[in-house]
Image (cartoon, rainbow, N blue to C red):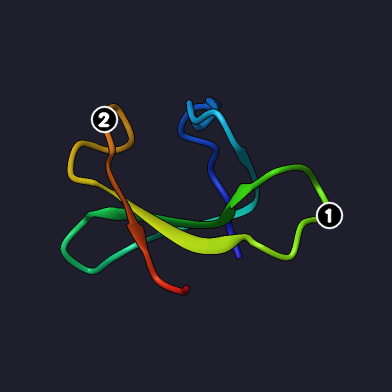
Amino acid sequence: MKITVIRKGKIDHPTYHGWPTVTRTKDNKLIAVCSGNRQKHICPYGRVWMYVSDDNGKTWNGPKALSS
């Protein structure tokens, strides 16, 4: 498996987001999911968030909550 880092960055959100995973779809979109909306690292109130990029990670749409 070959892994290429496109660019490094951070999610600009006032709550803790962690454990990100990114994949590229067949139609060349990047999809990132993470555990977010936490008060700190260990927090039972987190949700799974999804972000989508159509321009190779320059801009992102979202977040969209995938869990409640």
Is disc 2 surrounded by few (<14), some (14 to 19) or many (20+) residues within 10 Å? few
Amino acid type at mark 1 = Ile
Amino acid type at mark 2 = Thr
Residue at screen point 50% across, 32% down: 11
Residue at screen point 83% across, 54% down: 42
Badge 2 element: loop
Q: Are marks 2 and 1 in contact (CB under 8 Å)?
A: no
Residue identifier under label 2: 59
Q: Position of residue 32 (x, y in %)?
A: 43, 54
Image disc number at residue 50: none
Q: Is residue 5 left or right of residue 26?
A: right
Residue identifier under label 1: 42
Viewer-nearest residue: 54 or 33:
33
Viewer-nearest residue: 30 or 46:
46
Using the numbered discs, state the Cα–Cα distance from disc 2 to disc 1 in whole angstroms: 29 Å
Viewer-nearest residue: 56 or 19:
19
Q: Position of residue 27 (x, y in %)?
A: 16, 63
- The quadrant of the picture occupied by the N terminus is bottom right
Residue at screen point 62% across, 60% down: 46
- The earlier-in-sequence mark between 2 and 1 is 1
Whether residue 11 is situated above or below residue 64 in the rendered picture: above
Q: Is residue 17 left or right of residue 53?
A: right
Q: Residue furthest right?
A: 42
Whether residue 5 is situated above or below residue 32 in the rendered picture: above
Name the front one of labels 2 and 1.
1
Q: Is residue 52 left or right of residue 8?
A: left
